[in-house]
Image (cartoon, rainbow, N blue to C red):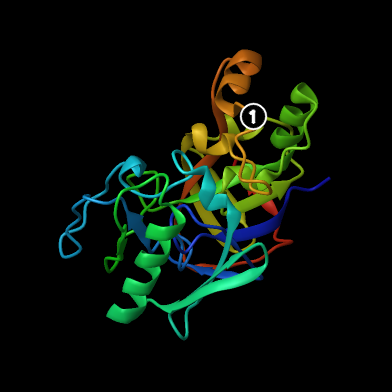
Amino acid sequence: MPATVTDIYRYPVKGLSGEKLVETRLSPGQTITGDRIFALGRPGFSFNIENPVWMPKTNFLALVRDAQLAELTTRYDDASNTLTVRLDGNEVIAADLSSADGRAQLEAFFERFMADEISGAPTLLKADGHSFSDLDDKVISLINLESVRELNKKTGADTNPLRFRGNVYFNGVPAWDELDWVDRELTIGEMRLKVIKRTRRCAATNVNPDTAIRDMNIPATLQKNWGHADLGIYARVINAGTLRPGDALKLSS
């Protein structure tokens, strides 16, 4: 079976739910457009949006510490700058993130929603050109669905691949082969990318995105069965182009 892209996702707000894309335009050395452009800084955390630098995810609301975030479904509209948040299928807030009032409303919502976990309101953060990625680099993350299936065979679970919060999901490659692609180039449709790093999984993947419950220990399971805690890879975009589901994925020779 030829290797192909099955799904593309972006995560406009770090720690919140992903959005499935029908296509995305990529630029050299950049993330998927609109991915991790916002974050919610924990109460008391100071971040200079005029001179942004990468900071560890523990400074932000994120699934690694805050499983409750998975209860929310969010959608960001680029045209109106509006983030809509739903809980149990019901809209609980729609905030214009370009306005001070809208940002304040969103911060107040999360102060209430996370009252048992945080003391005070988080701060909605955005800095031009900055990505609140887990990696100190502008990359896209790729997940081999066959590796997820192998994990499922070992655990007997039906693990939702969205646990791994990847940008690009693909089929048609033997399980774990992608971990040997570091420093090699890929072509995906018209795109060229260079794989720079394996993705080491953390406690965020223990959270079931359907139930918001920590019902697995993914890093420990990977370590026990395969001798590493990696699932997925990071790649840097080399040339501009459009990425779509169905695009063929090939490893350069």
Query: Is 3 displayed left or right of 31 in the figure?
Result: right
Mark 1 neighbour class, 10 Å CA radius: few under 14, some 14 to 19, many 20 or more: some
Q: Residue 227, relative to residue 195: is it above or below?
A: above
How far across and down, in percent of the image, does residue 52 sit? 21, 57
Q: Quadrant of residue 191?
A: bottom right
How far across and down, in percent of the image, does residue 98 sit? 34, 80
Q: Residue 242, relative to residue 68: is it above or below?
A: below
Q: Residue at x 27, y 51 (%)?
A: 43
Question: Amino acid type of disc 1?
Answer: Met
Examine the rendering and report whether any part of residue 28 can be seen.
no
Q: Residue at x 27, y 48 (%)?
A: 54
How far across and down, in percent of the image, does residue 63 sit? 49, 44
The residue that label 1 is drawn on is 216
Query: Is 248 displayed left or right of 235 in the figure?
Result: right
Q: Quadrant of the C terminus?
A: top right
Query: Is 106 displayed left or right of 75 in the figure?
Result: left
Q: How many marks?
A: 1
